[in-house]
Image: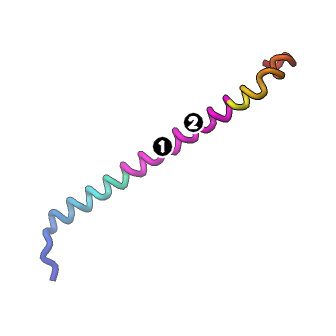
């Protein structure tokens, strides 16, 4: 037999749903920031290694 508190069970279920939503939002934001950081690092690396000859050719 189950003698658990149904109100506590409902509250815990709602809290778990809220936590899952917050966790997925946070992970999505983390992924967006990570992608932006990697793209910026690649852009800076390419600018560093190609900047000199691109300026010499008049393309920069």
Q: Is 40 located above or below residue 15 in the figure?
A: above
Magenta-span inclusion, residue 34? yes
x and y percent of residue 30 in the render?
48, 43
**Which residue was labeled with disc 2?**
37
Magenta-span inclusion, residue 43? yes
Q: CA distance from mark 2 to mark 1?
A: 10 Å
Q: Residue at point 54% right, 41% down?
A: 34
Position of residue 45 in the picture relative to residue 24 (left or right):
right
Q: Quadrant of the N terminus?
A: bottom left
Residues drawn in magenta = 22-44
Q: Residue furthest bottom?
A: 1
Position of residue 3 in the picture relative to residue 52 (left or right):
left
- The disc, 2 or 1, on the residue closer to the chain's N-terminal end is 1
Q: Is 12 located above or below residue 45 in the figure?
A: below
Asked whether disc 2 touches disc 1, contact meaning CB atoms under 8 Å apart, the reply is no
**Which residue was labeled with disc 1?**
30
- Crowd rating for badge 1 (residues with CA inside 10 Å; few <14, some 14–19, many 20+): few
């Amino acid at each position: 037999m189950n003698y658990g508190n149904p109100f506590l069970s409902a509250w815990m279920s709602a809290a778990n749903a809220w936590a899952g939503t917050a966790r997925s939002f946070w992970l999505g934001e983390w992924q967006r920031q990570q992608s932006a950081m990697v793209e910026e690092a690649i852009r800076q690396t390419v600018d560093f290694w190609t900047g000199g000859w691109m300026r010499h050719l008049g393309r920069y």
